[in-house]
């Protein structure tokens, strides 16, 4: 475990990237109440490639918008029941992918679920924070403001 002085301090919401999924910027709520991170996903489709179970899914990276749509592919590492804050349990696919926050990058596990009705398209849970980040719940975007182009409407046909 790192010395607390070496941990990066983040706000309760931050811009993150998921480079292996082709997501340059998504606003994430840093949620110490959630064990596992969650990513918005729709049109989930599993398939086998080279003996590995994979999932293809769509993702709306911009809050309160259904465009643009980004389509991602990732290895499925598990399928497990997850209970949300309302007490509802749902079976979710779990993937592992690198997350980039500022200049730092590390692999995290996250579940895939529809978050169209939620304010944030991604939750960054305790497992992803452990040993790396401290959360200042009074602050937002301590790592940086919105990346150029993030949250802006793109030209038709672009991702």
Image (cartoon, rainbow, N blue to C red):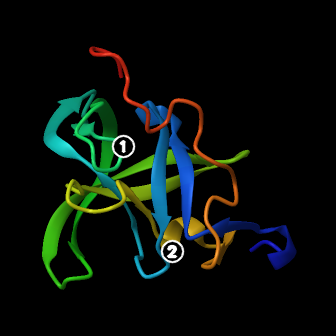
Tag shown at residue 45: none
Q: First in sequence: mark 1 or mark 2?
A: 1
> Where in the figure is residue 102, as x and y percent of width and height?
69, 47
- In this orientation, which residue lies closer to the viewer: 43 or 13? 13
Identify the residue at horizontal 15%, vertical 42% (top origin). 44
> Where in the figure is residue 22, as x and y percent of width and height?
44, 30
- In this orientation, which residue lies closer to the viewer: 141 or 22? 141
Q: Is 158 placed left or right of 126 in the picture?
A: left
The residue that disc 1 covers is 62
Label 1 vs label 2, nearer the camera: 1
Q: Secondary structure at mark 2?
A: helix
> Where in the figure is residue 88, as x and y percent of width and height?
14, 79
The residue that disc 2 covers is 126
Identify the residue at horizontal 60%, vertical 79% (top origin). 137
> Where in the figure is residue 75, as x and y percent of width and height?
33, 41
- Which quarter of the rendered picture does the C terminus lie within? top left
Give neighbour class at mark 1: few <14, some 14-19, many 20+ (Cα, 10 Å). many
- Which quarter of the rendered picture does the N terminus lie within? bottom right
Give neighbour class at mark 2: few <14, some 14-19, many 20+ (Cα, 10 Å). some
**Which residue in the rendered view is the most extreme toward the front?**
153
Identify the residue at horizontal 26%, vertical 33% (top origin). 67
């Amino acid at each position: 475990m790192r010395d607390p002085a070496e941990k990066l301090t983040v706000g309760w919401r931050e811009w993150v990237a998921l480079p292996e999924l082709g997501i340059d910027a998504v606003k994430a709520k840093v949620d110490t109440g959630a064990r596992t991170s969650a990513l918005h996903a729709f049109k989930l489709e599993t398939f086998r490639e080279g003996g590995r179970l994979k999932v293809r899914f769509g993702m709306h990276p911009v809050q309160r918008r259904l465009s643009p749509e980004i389509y991602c592919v990732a290895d499925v590492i598990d399928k497990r029941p997850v209970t949300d804050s309302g007490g509802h349990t749902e079976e979710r696919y779990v993937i592992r992918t690198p997350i980039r926050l500022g200049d730092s990058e590390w692999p995290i596990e996250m579940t895939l679920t529809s978050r169209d009705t939620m304010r944030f398209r991604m939750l960054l849970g305790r497992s992803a924070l452990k040993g790396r980040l401290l959360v200042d719940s009074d602050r937002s975007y301590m790592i940086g403001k919105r990346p150029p182009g993030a949250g802006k409407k793109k030209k038709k046909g672009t991702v």
